[in-house]
Image (cartoon, helix red, strand yellow):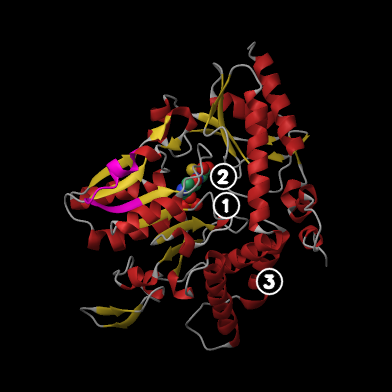
Amino acid sequence: MMTASTVNRLPGKEIDWAALRADFPILDQKVNGHPLVYFDNAATSQKPRAVINALDHYYERDNANVHRGIHELSNRATAGFEGARARAAAFLNARAAEEIVFTRGTTEGINLVAAAWGNRHIKAGDVILLTEMEHHSNLVPWQLLAERTGAKLAFLPITGDIGQLDLNRVDEFLTRDVKLLAMVHISNSLGTINPVSELCDRARKLGITTLVDAAQSVGHRPLDVQEIGCDFLAFSGHKMCGPTGIGVLYGRGEVLERMPPYQGGGEMILSVEYQRSTWKQPPHRFEAGTPDIAGAIGLHAAMDYLDGIGRENIARHDMELGAHAYATLAGLQGIRLFGPHVGRAGIVSFLVKDIHAHDVVELANRRGIALRGGHHCTQPLMRKLGVESTSRASFYFYNTTDEIDGFAEVIRDIMKFFGR
Ligand code: C6P
């Protein structure tokens, strides 16, 4: 059967982005009497039929535990799970499937590094360098590590509401005491795209280990861990058309090999005695217990789906949507916009003068539009910007400029409703 995405893939054909919506059953519904406009993709993306079918197929035909049985179903489940690992390695251009550790998501990936790598390599006085725009997932695990070890946290500063890293000050912060640079690739609150390849390169020259939080970038643009040159990169499947509960931690082979386990249990051991145990090689050393097999298989389908469209195409469309939304909102009186004017991702945070972010989200919801309001798990960044919260519209390739224009009309109506 030709899906909208396979039709779109025909050579030489311009992508009909609106036609891709047919691949997403959930988009075809009304909310509060209006066609659903889903602008909460930074929180989680919707799932195409290809992913839903892969999950159904797995549970209907192949469900069994992995790596344990020698019966047919277990072999199929293992092949599906390990096939997903190889696919993730290709998706990121990792050197080997062994560099791919399955996790529950970005948060768990970063916690894994903070515990397994951090406990071994970080000591009192060491500096962990982050940025001022980190999500709590790339902040709190390092705070916990600093408490355990006596390490210090430092933050690369951002420049005002434009929210870009102040690259003129990198040398001042990238000192010999820094042992780890951990930074977000695309900010979930600002839509800023950080120059991670350049920063990893500068860190590597000083022998500093690097981690990239790719939660908001992995499904939105091509990512090549060798080109970025990072030691670790973490992402979640659910923000890139895959299921919830599955994610990937990429770790450079030599770094993973020198790391002790994260959690103990079945699957990760070579041999166990009453008093001690020995571990498997990575990645299995870091995957204690029964993994999310279906999630990995669904993630495989998501990666195939995205590459069917082409991640360069998705990146271009994303940036067009981000630029259109930013320019349209900037044309309204009384709107404060956050993040870069140009070169931004498809995430736009804003405040409507004297109206609480949650009220904007609530009123937009009445018109069928799904936004997010709050601190977006970036409380220190919000304080830095001098606000408590923002409203946020975040796009994916199935969104259209028509939807953005309709959304801008709703914002105008909300302003009128509040007499602004
Ligand atoms: N942001 C949002 O912005 P998990 O929950 O582990 O799948 O992802 C955590 C995470 C880590 N880093 C960044 C940059 C993120 O944006 C997120 C998740 C969501 O709406 C939820 S706060």
Residue 396 seen in render: no
Q: Residue at x 55, y 82 (%)?
A: 74
User: In terms of image quadrants, where is residue 48?
Assistant: bottom right
Looking at this view, name the residue that lies furthest to the top: 419
Q: Position of residue 369 (x, y in %)?
A: 68, 34
Q: Magenta segment: does it hold 131? A: no
Mark 3 to mark 2: distance in Å? 28 Å
Residue 85 versus residue 231 in the image, above or below: below
Mark 1 to mark 2: distance in Å? 7 Å
Mark 1 to mark 3: distance in Å? 22 Å
User: In terms of image quadrants, where is residue 324?
Assistant: top right
Q: Secondary structure at mark 3?
A: helix
Q: Amino acid at mark 2?
A: Ala
Disc 2: CA contacts within 10 A as few (<14), some (14-19) or many (>=20): many
- Residue 90 vs residue 257: left or right? right
- The CB of the residue at mark 2 lies under 8 Å from ligand 1: yes
Q: Residue at x 82, y 61 (%)?
A: 7
Disc 1: CA contacts within 10 A as few (<14), some (14-19) or many (>=20): many
Q: Earlier in the sequence, mark 1 or mark 2?
A: 2
Residue 57 versus residue 116 in the image, above or below: below
Q: Amino acid at mark 1?
A: Lys
Q: Which residue is mark 1?
A: 239
Q: Are marks 1 and 2 in contact (CB under 8 Å)?
A: yes
Q: Residue at x 47, y 75 (%)?
A: 96
Magenta stretch in the rendered image? 169-181
Q: Magenta segment: does it hold 172? A: yes
Q: Position of residue 189 (x, y in %)?
A: 50, 37
Q: Position of residue 330 (x, y in %)?
A: 62, 24
Q: Earlier in the sequence, mark 1 or mark 3?
A: 3
- The CB of the residue at mark 3 lies under 8 Å from ligand 1: no
